[in-house]
Amino acid sequence: MRLLRAAGLGLLIAFVLSACVPTKVTRSPQELAAAQHAEQLASQGQFDQAIQAYLDLGRQTGDTDHYNILAAEVYREEGALEQAAPLLDQVRRPRLQGEDAARYDLLRAELALAHHDAHTALQLTTQPAPVPPTLELRLLELRARAMEASGDLWGAARTRVQMDPQLEGLDHTQNRKQILDLLGRLGVEPLKRRGAAMQAGDRMLPWINEALTQLGVPVAQPQPDLDQPVGTMLPGADANVREGYRMPANVALLLPLGGNFAGASGAIRQGFFAGYADAARTRAPRANVRVYDSGGTADSAIKAYQQAASDGAQLIVGPLTRTEVAAVFGQAQLPVPLLALNHPDDKSLPAAGATEFGLLPETEGAQAADHMVERGVHGAYVVVSDDDFAQRAAGAFKAEFEARGGHVAGMATLPPGKVNYANAIAGLNMPTTATPLAGTEPAEAASAPAVAGSAEALPAPVPTGDTGIFISMRPEQARRLLPQLHVAHIGLPVFATSHIYAGVDDAAANRDLDGVEFSDAPWLFDAQPGLPSHDAIASRLPAARGTSARLFAFGMDAWNLVPYLDWLRDHPGSYLPGASGQLAADQFGRIRRVLIWARFQDGLARPLTGSLQLDDVPSAAPPINEGTSTPIPATSTGVPPAASTTLPPAGH
């Protein structure tokens, strides 16, 4: 990446106007005016005239070194750096000071790189001499290029990470792509070794994890810091709003309104406007909102974005599908800031000016691992369906659980279309008990062979008392699995993703799920104070019921994030208490969710922590069983569940 030419011209302007030269040199008003005229010629693209004007000034004033450097800078901006070499050859380097010296060395370093002389370029860009702040980015970029050319990929990546907070726009996007490319070229194993040796706060660790993710390696996803809810309540003229609340005047909502995505879009749209309507309760400033059909394709999403921008939108929310998001991100630049409602299918970082927000199964898998470890569970068996969401959740669970010191003793995928899971269960060789209660002496494990390809044989299981089962599947599969675990005398505690809960109370159907703990959106349980009542809205709007309630909550959060996006990105540790979870922004522009935990009891799903008013983070205190410190195991009546109809999962 070469920093944009406009940025270089801006620095040249500053150099000329401030007369950054050795302190012994005094410029006359006539000389300063002539230098400013030469700079204006360069900014207007009249490069030859600007170069000649600088050379004339050098002859007239006798300060040829200074003005040769400025003329060489114009050649660089013109893209004709080679023509600057004769001018630099005439410069007496030992006599240079301050910014003149720094510019000379940077020009020489760039020429060396053009001649494939990485050694010289590296020497010139790693000297201990101080560099003016206006030239720091240019120095770092040349240093990174020299390191890459000399084979030091790690050093080049670190240098570009150092540049990252200072860049904007297309420069920022290009620099981030190059960081990940450099790290990816190091390879998986070297990245793993470097990551394992780093402290938690090392600024390179998130980049290593991101590079590994893009290489297809599941990595640990530590939960974001939740230090302070967004701002504090501040009195307004006729309203109370939070510190950091900055609402744009015009907002566009891009959703695919037809086809296969119409149902999901409808729930998100209704949730978005439910949040909009609720804002009137506090009389907080609200934007004008206009809805656009993104069409569900790459081309239609780009057209919708461009139309919204042309219509005066100051923030665009959407589009929804991965294909749409990737297409919008792929534009050369985003003239209007974007809150995308998904992550691109190519796993690329958010574009400059963009924020990503999505309901990711990886989030649930990683937080299930954290939840189990916090409850003293250090060994796990993983049983999931063959659905994409379940496989992704399982990968994230394993990575996070092992990063937290846990041991995954076995993994199995339930055979699709089957109702008998005995072979998959037996193939895991899970510890058994005389009764379906965790912590008792294990009986001999079932010995039936596993179905080929259904279970992964791994090391011997760890003791029952600190072992649990992680599952990710739809409710009907879980209702079949839990009784079969009971029949096999497996009484380990069970932890699940939100997909196990259909979003409605059905005590008869869910009795077999008693004891299962699962992560979910707090709004489904009215567990987040300050939000509209879920029960009240669900009584009036079908989209707020069942599994679509998660998409409804997602839409509410999309609206509630609008005025806080800048605040969340500028204040690490701040978070928005949301309907779909506690929401925080990471350094890459992704909104991260921290979920609430719930548990089935008597067939009813209830949050473990009740209201989040006093504890915005899910409690680390485990539910206890009859005075012991062991998590309560999932139990079952042993009776096959009644047939029931279940809505599809809310993942998208």
Image: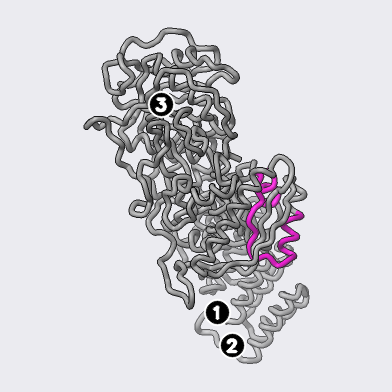
Q: Which residue is mark 1?
A: 21
Residue occupying image coordinates x 60% and y 42%: 347
Give the residue at mark 3: 469
First along the sequence among labels 2 and 3: 2
Q: Nearer the viewer, mark 2 or mark 3?
A: 3
As drawn, the residue found furthest toward the top would be 448
Query: Residue 115 at what x, y percent from top left?
Result: 67, 53
Q: Which residues are magenta?
A: 303-330
Whether residue 290 is visible here, answered yes or no, is yes
Left or right: 118 in relation to 242: right
Q: How packed is label 3: few (under 14 Cα within 10 Å), some, or many (20 or more)?
A: many
In the image, 46 versus 180, the foreground residue is 180
Q: Are marks 2 and 1 in contact (CB under 8 Å)?
A: yes
Question: Quadrant where the N terminus lies?
Answer: bottom right
Q: Horizontal placement of 42 versus 20: left or right? A: right
Element assignment for label 1: loop
User: What is the three-letter code of the residue carrying label 2?
Assistant: Arg
227 or 526: which is nearer to us? 526
Residue 489 falls in which quadrant of the image?
top left
**Residue that carries the numbered disc 2 in the rendered image:** 27
Is residue 459 shown in magenta?
A: no
Q: Residue at x 73, y 80 (%)?
A: 53
Q: What residue is drawn where x is 43% and y is 52%?
A: 528
